[in-house]
Amino acid sequence: MAAVSPSSHLNKAVRQQYMSLPQGETCQVTYVWIDGTGEGLRSKTRTLCRNPKIIEDIPEWNFDGSSTYQAEGSNSDMYLIPVCMFRDPFTLDPNKLALCEVLKYNRLPAETNHRSSCSKVMEAVKEHCIWFGMEQEYTLLGVDGHPFGWPANGYPAPQGPYYCGVGANNAYGRDIVGCHYKACLYAGVKIYGTNAEVMPSQWEFQVGPCEGIEMGDHLWVARYLLHRVCEDFGVVATLDPKPMVGNWNGAGCHTNVSTKEMREKGGLQYIEQAIEKLSKKHAEHIRVYDPHGGQDNIRRLTGLHETSSIEDFSAGVANRGASIRIPRQVGQEKRGYFEDRRPSANCDPYTVTRAITATCLLDTDEGEESK
């Protein structure tokens, strides 16, 4: 059995005694942001004298960027700009979570602040009412890095019974999944659903449909909640696209896309037009579909384990081995959405949705958009 953290063994009844104390008119706000790795999340909390009703009620703050891979010690202060507010499922009402953009000392976006450029693209295409849904796969590990529930010195039975599986021999960590789901609902995250995945101890949750910039906001907060829930249970959620080598599925973040025209009668023609545009910019998209310019996806997009090859672009109806899948129902109804199966589990949803939107609706080079 994978090792769990010592903090998970602390007496939670003692903690609850303090958590239930009244806090008067004050409100705790936890500021959440993306660090300099482009994957990690950081947070810190402050007290406000009254309950914020809108995001503008939460003041800017700052942090030490030299400790988050975002600045040098000689010029380390970074700005936190609250952009989206959620209820806090850990300290409960009236307390809040505030997702923040990070600005440098000169108030320009930090290198891993891709929300800023994504927001500009979404504003430029707002008349298209573009919707996204992202399917976040992840793997539960012990603090020792061994998959949660796997035998200490070996492997579980081969893949087959685990996808949407039921039973102690098939589903590892359902308590964590259920708690995360409830935390998302309480917070106001647009979580759509969840299921056990093909590899044991691997799970998926879906966020959406979300319009425009909302997609990145809600997925990042859902990830934060996942890491915090796992912290309470003493395990680790990894978004590594290929956490286990060998005959095991990797982890992606399949992205479903639909514009107003695609959803209307005869929308299939607009879906096909978008896929044609995507086919011409496969390499550019691969470069922004994981935080390391495609190097993470090389391990995952092999053409095996329900993936396409990273080298080739492909599309098909109900084909989970293609770059782009058109769901069977969409093919029958001639309208709806398409699924881009290339983004890695650790992708930045802002860069993914920005790239898809720019290619499909603006005919803009993704390299130019990212500048």
Image (spheres, rainbow, N blue to C red):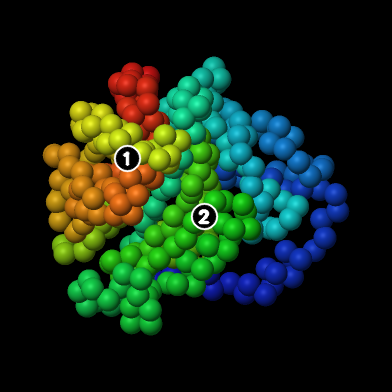
Q: In the rendered image, which quarter is residue 297 located in?
A: top left
Mark 1 vs 2, N-terminal side: 2
Which structural element holds mark 1?
A: helix
Crowd around label 1: few <14 · some 14–19 · many ≥20 (10 Å): many
Compared with residue 271, is residue 16 higher up or lower down, i.e. above or below?
below
Q: Secondary structure at mark 2?
A: strand
Cα distance, mark 1 to mark 2?
A: 26 Å
Furthest residue in direction front, as rendered = 265
In front of the other: 61 or 299: 299
The image's mark for residue 268 is: 1
Q: Residue at x 37, y 67 (%)?
A: 196
| Residue identified by numbered label 2 | 191
The answer, for residue 327, to whether it is visible in the render is no
Residue placed at 60% from the left, 34% from the top? Answer: 83
Q: Are marks 1 and 2 in contact (CB under 8 Å)?
A: no
Up-down relation of residue 65 to residue 134 (above or below): above
The residue lying furthest to the right in this view is 24
Identified by mark 1, the residue type is Leu
